Each structure stands twice: as C-alpha cells, then as structure tokens.
Image (spheres, grey):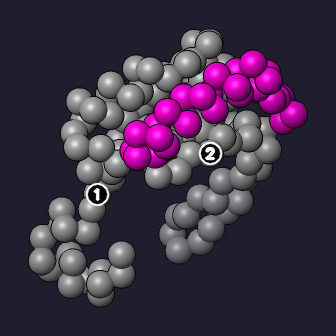
Amino acid sequence: MRFMMLMIPKGYANAAADCMPSAEAVAAMMKYNQAMKDAGVLLSCEGLHPPAKSARVAFADGKSTVMHGPFRTPEALGGYWMIQVKSLDEAIAWTKRCPVGHDAVIEIRQVQEFEDFPADVQKAAGGLR
C-alpha cells in the first residue's frame, strides 16, 4: 500500500516567499528520511515553497483562470512523503516518528492503486498507470 504523508505546518499559509527552515530542522528531518529509506519504505519526499510563491489555475464553464499567491487559506502544504508500507497503522507509526519541531499536522492519505478501481474504470484508463 502506498500512502502520501502531507505536512501542514501551522502558519505556513502566511509565510514570506523567502521562508526557509533552519539547518537544525533540516538535519533532523534528513535523519528521519534516512531511517525511512533504510527501512525500505520511502519512495519519495519533497519540501514545498510557501504559498506566496505559488499559483492556482481554476476551471469553470470550460475556461481557466490563473491566480497568483499568496492565498487566504487556513492551511498550506509544506511538503510530502510517499511511502510504501503494509497498512495504515504502519503509516501512522512512521508519521508519529516525524521530528516536527513546531505546530503541524501530517495528513496520511492512501494512494488509489489501479487495481482498486472496477473493471470499467480500469478500461477507461486505457491501461495508463
């Protein structure tokens, strides 16, 4: 089972465009990431710049509109991990080990695998995985 762990740091939605983590925070996070890599569960991970450096594309009535950040939102993603483990409980156990040094939430979402979909949906996907 693959799971995406979504880091949602408190206050990140209002962070300045040049906001960066401290060297100490990065070192602690890299130790955590290395432990997941060594255990064979880490597939990928990345940090994200704050919303002040972002854009959104909204779709309505067949048209698209581009909006540039920052956005007024109570929460913003600060990064993610993609892991492969045997269960949600195992994903939770890895998440609880994360060295979050500030107020944050990590949301855990299971990835929808191709095999999870009914045959008609798999056929509509045309085998694209």
Name the residue at 30% across, 44% down.
Answer: 85
Q: Picture coordinates of residue 21 (x, y %)?
A: 76, 26
The residue positioned farthest toward the front in the image shown: 38
Name the residue at 29% across, 87% down.
Answer: 126
Q: Name the side, left or right, on which 23 lies relative to 117.
A: right
Instruction: Report if residue 116 is visible in the image.
Output: yes
The three-letter amino acid code for the residue at tag 2 is: Glu
Which residue is denoted by mark 1 in the rendering? 112
Label 1 SS: loop
Q: How many angstroms separate mark 2 from mark 1 (CA)? A: 20 Å
Q: Picture coordinates of residue 40 (x, y %)?
A: 40, 46
Q: Picture coordinates of residue 88 (x, y %)?
A: 24, 36
Q: Residues within 10 Å of mark 2 (few under 14, many from 20)?
A: few
Where are the magenta residues, as a range?
Answer: 15-42
Label 2 SS: strand
The three-letter amino acid code for the residue at tag 1 is: Gln
Which residue is denoted by mark 2 in the rendering? 46
User: On the image, which quarter does residue 28 sit in?
Assistant: top right
Magenta run includes residue 128: no
Instruction: Report if residue 73 is visible in the image.
Output: no
Name the residue at 51% across, 69% down.
Answer: 61
Q: Name the side, left or right, on which 119 lies relative to 9.
A: left
Marks 2 & 1, CB-CB < 8 Å contact: no
99 vs 69: above or below: above
Q: From the image, which quarter does the C terminus lie in? A: bottom left
Magenta run includes residue 39: yes
Along the viewing direction, whichever of 39 and 30 lies nearer the viewer: 39
Q: Name the side, left or right, on which 73 lies relative to 16.
A: left
